Amino acid sequence: MKTSGSSRWFLGAALALVAIAGPADAQDYKLGYVTDLSGPLAGSYTPTWQGFELYMKALNGRGGVGDRKVKLFLDDDGLRADRAVASVKKQTERDGVLGIFGLSLSSTQAAVIAEMTKAGVPVVSTFSAIFDALPPANRYYFSTGVLFEVAGEAIAELSRQITPKGKVVGMTFDSVGGRAALRHNKAIAESLGYAWDEVVFPVRTSDFSPFAQSVAAMKPDIVVGHYGAEQNLGVIPALRQAGYDGPYVIASYGASEETAKAAAERAGSGKNIYLVSRYAPPTEDVPGMKAVKAAAKQYGVDHPTIMHVTGWVLAKFAAEALAKCGANCTRESLDKTMQTLSVETEGLSGGSIQMSGQDHYGPTYWRLYRWDNDRLVGVGEWLKKLGLKSSVK
Amino acid sequence: METIVSILGLGTTYALLAAGLVILYKASRVVNFAHGELAIVGGYVFYSTSLVWHGNALAGAIASTVISVVFGLVIYLSLMRRLVGEATYVAAMVTIGLSIILKALIVIVWRSQSLGLPLGRETIYTFQGGGRVAAIDAVTVGVGVVFFILLSIFFRYARLGRQFRGAAENALLASQRQVNVNLILGFAWALAVFSACLAGVLYGSRSMLAPQSTIIGINGLTAALVGGLDSVRGAALGGLLVAAAIFVTARTIDPALSDAVPFVILLIVMTLRPWGLFGTQEELDRV
């Protein structure tokens, strides 16, 4: 694995060793997985990888895909584009993987997708996605995750279940994805009759009190946070301290019930904390969750979260693509298979994942949850989103 | 009221960081570029040691104090001692290396986990008229005031403190007068790492601990430079100035610019008064 001399080299090397431990059988299906396991968003991406791995362990425990095991190759990009590209090149050129899964933030994805498109290797991202999956989709790029623009619109529509009118204040850090989510949230919120205001703070912020005080001074009826789990942990207590006790919506960019729980503890109350998610939390009693919980118990994952479910569904997508692709599966045929693939989520989301030639994201389903003492409780039904409503750029 | 209290809270954290930088600079002419990392690692150490004692914050505080002092001595004895007499940029480069190692430690030991320390963040006092004060802000300001008072008393009245000042003025002369300069330098590192740890624990309680939190080291350095690299009094004022600048920018100009404002202040001060607000003018030659 090509790495710089940074401090994260050690962990990266250790992970690479884990990945190559145990020789792959010639009959194994080989899949690559690259994500941020040591960078700023490792807390969000690590459980997603664990969910992916969990599904594959359970699958291999049952004999694999058509009696062939699935061998995984894992690399850590540390949220750096150069490391992500080096990792996928290593996995495709040396390890011989059929496809690349996972990926981290959008800032690393563009470079990876460009490289893999040249090499003809299909890439499927979760949980963050970029525009290339929407029609007209990049041929080799798919996503089962959260596309910021779509999420922004879904959150705006689901806000009606909190309060049908008033003022929404959107918060994000100064990033491409965050600003994109904010733009689409704003466009739909305003079309629904909400007043809108926003606060964008620097990416490397870790003391949120000045921004929280600005938000509180805007007298919002709803505050939406478009950033990762880590920022929510700082923003929610700061907002409460600044005097804003109203509804706060956590966008599902790596945030889970663990985020809501920790933020509630730090803020002194979990009241009025909401979360919008593309996938269901493990506390939901749906058919697909039984398999998640059984595998978590069998393979020692103590507290599976929405992020584990997100990774699990991605793995299910990969496994069903391999099964449909058949024994002589190649990168080319795997890509073709994915272009028409439909995967039933068994309640893990509001509906199935359906790809088509032009749309590599398909219909997505979003649900509002409220933090209620010690768990997320669904508010209303799943919202189905088909692409984008707003044409705002 | 919330804004003033928040400025005081954040400013005290930066002042503690700046004080550590000043202590080290006064003693050894070394600018420590690992100070932010030392602070955040100190916060993580407090978190882990508290867990060992089932969430007992007092036990965690005692343990992390001991660990920070010992770690400061270890840094001096293993890394910095052999650089005495070398050009100061060599020592500065070593501290940059140290910062990289400490960042790796956050990844390997604490898995880049983002967390808040439980020292009163959730307790908020509401006053008549609507003012709100978080207990942690009051604790932070109180701890900062006590730290600076004790530091002043130490430098003014304690024998070791007077020797420290003497060694800072002229190490060669001090050593000829039987002052143990190695002891002074070791003590400076121990005290600096302790103040960084204190800042990290307080910062982790009022904000959060995360790999990106190490950025506070830059704000602490800015505070030290604005106040004057050899002035403890300047460190206190510099910390408050930097925090005030961040808040005023975020509240009245543009939140996205709040990161840059401390550097604007730094540029202004460095242009008009390069030795800082309270620094010694002759220090400039040594820098």
Image: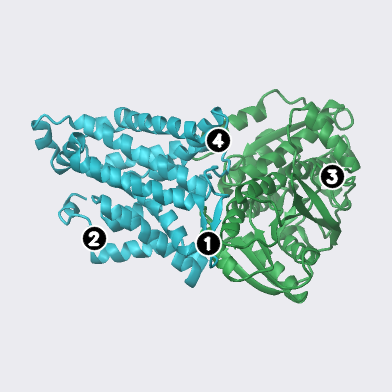
Chain colours: A green, B cyan
Using the image, determine if residue A17 lies above or below residue B272.
above
First-in-chain label (4 vs 2): 4
Q: Determine whether label 1 and label 4 are within 8 Å by CB.
A: no
**Residue type indicated by callout 3:** Glu
> Relative to residue B258, is residue A94 drawn left or right?
right
Where does label 1 land, which residue?
B127
Q: Quadrant of residue A107?
A: bottom right
Which of A120 and B13 lies nearest the eye of the viewer? B13
**Would residue B279 be visible to someone looking at this image?**
yes
Q: Chain of mark 2?
A: B
Distance, label 2 to label 1, CA atoms, is 43 Å
Which is more foreground, mark 2 or mark 3? 3
Which is more foreground, mark 2 or mark 1? 1
Which of A69 and A260 lies nearest the eye of the viewer? A260
**Would residue A140 be visible to someone looking at this image?**
no
Where does label 2 land, which residue?
B274
**Residue type indicated by callout 4:** Trp
Where does label 4 land, which residue?
B110
**Residue type indicated by callout 2:** Pro
- Number of numbered tags placed on the structure image: 4
Give the class, few, some or many, for how many residues have Cα within 10 Å of label 1's Cα (few <14, many ≥20): few
